[in-house]
Image (cartoon, grey):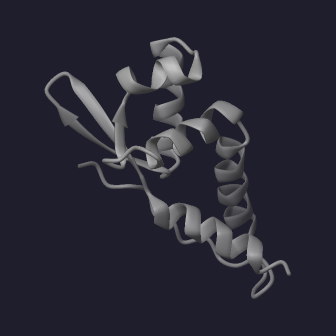
Amino acid sequence: MDAPLATDCPPLVLQHLSAAAAEHLAARFRVLGDPSRLQLLSLIASQPSGEACVCELTEPLGLSQPTVSHHLKVLYEAGFLIRERRGTWIYYRVVYQTLQDLGVTLSSLT
């Protein structure tokens, strides 16, 4: 399995947010700002096995295989997914820690 990117985002109000940390957070939120990517995360997480390949995701989204592959790559590179190659297919799983880290960051605003 490929290793996800580091998810060390500091809470927003417990300390001053550096420019680099703000850019890191903004990039992550931009990735989640696409409705198709949010649907992909939801579809993968809701699978009984907790994983899915492109072949299982194109029809429910009504998108082409290249488009779904692009969105999966963006989610993977942002640390929201891990992937594992099995023969010719790549299976994706959600990295829940990355989502939890963003949730902690947002909840620190209250």
Q: Nearer the viewer, residue 79 or 63?
A: 63
108, above or below 7, in the image: below
Q: Quadrant of the C terminus?
A: bottom right
15, above or below 12, in the image: below
The answer to whether residue 76 is left or right of residue 101 is left
Name the residue at 75% across, 76% down. Answer: 107
* One can see residue 22 in this view: yes
How many numbered discs sit on the rendered protein? 0
* One can see residue 17 in this view: no
The picture quadrant where one finds residue 87 is top left
Name the residue at 57% across, 61% down. Answer: 99
27, above or below 106, in the image: above
The answer to whether residue 54 is left or right of residue 16 is left
71, above or below 18, in the image: above
In the current view of this chain or complex, which residue is farthest to the left? 87
Q: Nearer the viewer, residue 47 or 16?
A: 47
Residue 109 at x, y percent in the picture: 83, 78
Residue 76 at x, y percent in the picture: 45, 43
In the current view of this chain or complex, which residue is farthest to the right? 110
Name the residue at 54% across, 72% down. Answer: 8
Residue 35 at x, y percent in the picture: 70, 34
Q: Nearer the viewer, residue 10 or 94?
A: 94
Q: Nearer the viewer, residue 14 or 66?
A: 66
Name the residue at 55% across, 44% down. Answer: 42
Residue 12 at x, y percent in the picture: 77, 76
